[in-house]
Image (cartoon, grey):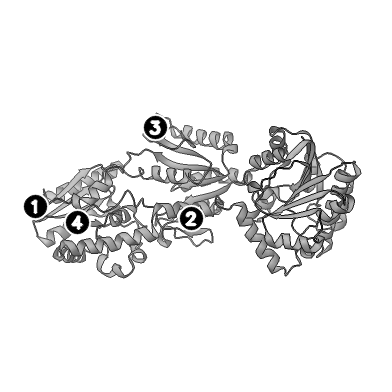
């Protein structure tokens, strides 16, 4: 599976976004190929299956060029990604969401901030999934929201108590952009109240915009006015690579942020084994039973000072014990591996062929053994689909004089079409490969235990045989294989020279479905169009590729008569743009 990531910056040295390098590396272990579009790129080392493209901010290009490049790349690279992950920038979902919907790309947004804007509302409408770290990180009511926790590299951010400076001075540390939303004034007032000169406060971070710089100047004036120069120190930028060492040097971490979303820096401090004090309401659910002693009301320097005094009075061993308990929270609920796994699963990357076997096992049990009846004979529309498919198989396999001594059928289900093959060529040998044990049991019931039919429970991609087959047949199964090219190449290896393949598969009409407001389920998101299927088959070495309608539907009206009428008109003609628009499924015939 191939992923497109949209993010602001790819640079391991960036103060705020350096961590995202680790996210990309983790995604690279889950996806076959990753393309990253970013506003600017800096220094990084990434796996070979990752390609990073800058939109031009680092080249000092005007903003208009960024947008132009964005549209250029999402269009020209559309074959290089199946799904999209936009990180903390909902405007790019607004820019590209309509196009991705037309292209049937699954779109997801990571958003973890308390602010709700019109842009976010529009992005939520266009996206399929919104990932967030806590409920407070995404405050719109939406069924698309998935709370995943944060993603902290717990092997990188870890305790190192030996790094502590051996003196009796308590070191209070904080990390974050120098900005009014971080409320450093409350910390200054709290330290003044404590009045303990045996305290050292170190704040890592820099201003990002002009207003932040003005705020920074005001803070330094206040520190000097309160005679706290040398007690409270701004140490400037600390890169993501250097951050663990800085956190490990502290005894306590403080966070006064008013953003209302889960601040990643707090979790990084917890992962390093530091007790934390915060007013951020998003931490209440994270801290659990520790919230009452580690949280204080916003802008309340008295309560913050009280919390600091309590931690000062603890012994080193007591603070370490508390810090390790907080680290355990991060390990269990906010570690990077777990986060990327949750996101990847939601995007469909881990839905392998075996998962489809489980899905159909449940389906057969729900239908109480009546799957074939429910699928093909429950109403006139379904019966028409059966009649059209049966004619298609009979015409292209039998009436056209195709001879075969053995046949490999993949995904026979309950044996619906195997019975037609057997009826017309009862002397041939058949091997039926299906990943669903319940389906194979139905096939055995419908066909029986006869010497020339062998039932094989296996994932086709793991199936091996010393035989070569005259005929490969599969109906409505190829759409469940993620690796279409690998699947067809395996078919090529299993067919004899001069052997024939017949595949029936659903025609994707994702655009029509989206226009009608129908959501495409993950299980049906792997359908492949006839032109793309032709390219894969020819690219695998097959020849004489022909494509025809297998079943048709009349638009808008649900009518079995009209469905069959359209089929009668088009069934013997090769599939074309007009008949493809009516085609519910198509058959593709090819020769080795």
- As helix, strand or loop, the secondary structure at mark 3 comes to helix
> What residue would you read off at disc 2?
342
Q: Which mark is residue 251?
A: 4
Give the CA distance from mark 1 to mark 3: 41 Å
Give the CA distance from mark 2 to mark 1: 49 Å
Along the horizontal axis of the image, is 323 left or right of 25?
left
Which is nearer the N-term, disc 3 or disc 2?
A: 3
Quadrant showing the C terminus: top right
Which is nearer the N-term, disc 1 or disc 3?
A: 3
The foreground one among 233 and 159 is 159
- Whole-percent x and y of residue 171? 16, 54
Tell me which residue sits at (91%, 44%) in the image: 399
Q: Are there few (<14), some (14-19), or many (20+) residues within 10 Å of tag 1?
A: few
Tell me which residue sits at (32%, 48%) in the image: 156
Task: Please identify the quarter of the rendering in which residue 271 is found.
Answer: bottom left
- Whole-percent x and y of residue 306? 18, 66
Q: Nearer the viewer, mark 1 or mark 3?
A: 3
- Whole-percent x and y of residue 236? 22, 42
Task: Please identify the quarter of the rendering in which residue 82 is found.
Answer: top right
- As helix, strand or loop, the secondary structure at mark 4 comes to loop
Which is nearer the N-term, disc 1 or disc 4?
A: 1
Instruction: Please say if the residues under marks 3 and 4 sit with CB atoms less than 8 Å apart.
Output: no
Along the horizontal axis of the image, is 218 left or right of 182?
left
The foreground one among 501 and 49 is 501
Instruction: Please say if the residues under marks 3 and 2 sit with CB atoms less than 8 Å apart.
Output: no
> What residue would you read off at disc 3?
58
Which is nearer the N-term, disc 2 or disc 4?
A: 4
């Amino acid at each position: 599976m191939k992923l497109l990531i949209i993010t602001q910056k790819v640079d391991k040295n960036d103060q705020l976004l350096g961590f995202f390098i680790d996210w990309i590396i983790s995604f690279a272990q889950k996806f076959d190929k990753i393309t990253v579009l970013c506003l600017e790129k800096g220094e990084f080392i990434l796996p070979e299956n990752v390609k990073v493209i800058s939109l031009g901010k680092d080249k000092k290009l005007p903003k208009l060029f960024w947008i132009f490049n964005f549209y250029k790349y999402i269009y020209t690279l559309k074959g290089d990604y199946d799904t999209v992950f936009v990180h903390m920038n909902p405007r790019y979902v607004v820019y590209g969401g309509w196009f991705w919907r037309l292209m049937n790309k699954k779109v997801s947004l990571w958003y973890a901030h308390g602010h709700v804007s019109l842009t976010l509302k529009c992005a939520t409408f266009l996206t399929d999934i919104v990932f967030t770290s806590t409920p407070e990180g995404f405050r719109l009511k939406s069924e698309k929201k998935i709370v995943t926790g944060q993603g902290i590299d717990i092997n990188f951010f870890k305790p190192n108590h030996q790094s502590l400076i051996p003196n009796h001075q308590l070191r209070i540390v904080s990390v974050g952009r120098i900005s009014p939303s971080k409320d450093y004034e409350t910390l200054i007032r709290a330290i003044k109240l404590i009045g303990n000169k045996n305290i050292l406060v170190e704040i890592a971070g820099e201003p990002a915009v002009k207003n932040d710089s003005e705020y920074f100047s005001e803070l330094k004036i206040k520190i000097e006015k309160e005679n706290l120069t040398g007690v409270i120190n701004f140490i400037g930028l600390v890169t993501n690579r250097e951050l663990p060492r800085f956190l490990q040097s502290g005894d306590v971490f403080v966070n006064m942020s008013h953003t209302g979303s889960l601040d990643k820096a707090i979790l990084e401090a917890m992962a390093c084994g530091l007790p934390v004090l915060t007013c951020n309401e998003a931490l209440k659910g994270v801290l659990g039973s520790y919230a009452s002693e580690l949280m204080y009301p916003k802008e309340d320097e008295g309560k913050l000072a009280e919390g600091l005094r309590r931690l000062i009075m603890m012994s080193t061993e007591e603070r370490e014990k508390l810090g390790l308990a907080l680290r355990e929270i991060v390990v269990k609920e906010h570690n990077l591996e777990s986060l990327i796994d949750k996101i990847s699963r939601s995007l469909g990357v881990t839905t392998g062929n075996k998962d489809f076997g489980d899905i159909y096992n449940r389906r057969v049990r729900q239908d109480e053994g009546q799957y074939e009846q429910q699928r093909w004979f429950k109403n006139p529309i379904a019966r028409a689909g059966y009649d059209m498919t049966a004619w298609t198989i009979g015409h292209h396999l039998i009436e056209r004089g195709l001879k075969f001594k053995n046949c490999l059928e993949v995904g026979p289900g309950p044996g619906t079409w195997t019975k037609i093959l057997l009826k017309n060529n009862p002397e041939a040998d058949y091997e039926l490969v299906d990943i669903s044990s319940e389906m194979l049991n139905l096939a055995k019931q419908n066909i029986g235990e006869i010497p020339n039919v062998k039932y094989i429970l296996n994932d086709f991609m793991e199936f091996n045989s010393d035989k070569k087959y005259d005929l490969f047949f599969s109906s409505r199964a190829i759409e469940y294989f993620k690796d279409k090219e690998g699947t067809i190449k395996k078919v090529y290896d299993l067919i004899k020279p001069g052997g024939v393949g017949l595949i029936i598969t659903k025609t994707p009409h994702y655009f029509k479905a989206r226009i009608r407001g129908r959501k495409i389920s993950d299980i049906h998101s792997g359908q492949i169009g006839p032109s793309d299927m032709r390219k894969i088959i020819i690219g695998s070495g097959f020849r004489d590729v022909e494509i025809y309608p297998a079943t048709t539907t009349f638009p808008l009206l649900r009518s079995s008569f009209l469905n069959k009428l359209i089929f009668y008109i088009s069934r013997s003609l090769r599939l074309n743009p007009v008949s493809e628009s009516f085609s519910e499924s198509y058959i593709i015939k090819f020769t080795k």
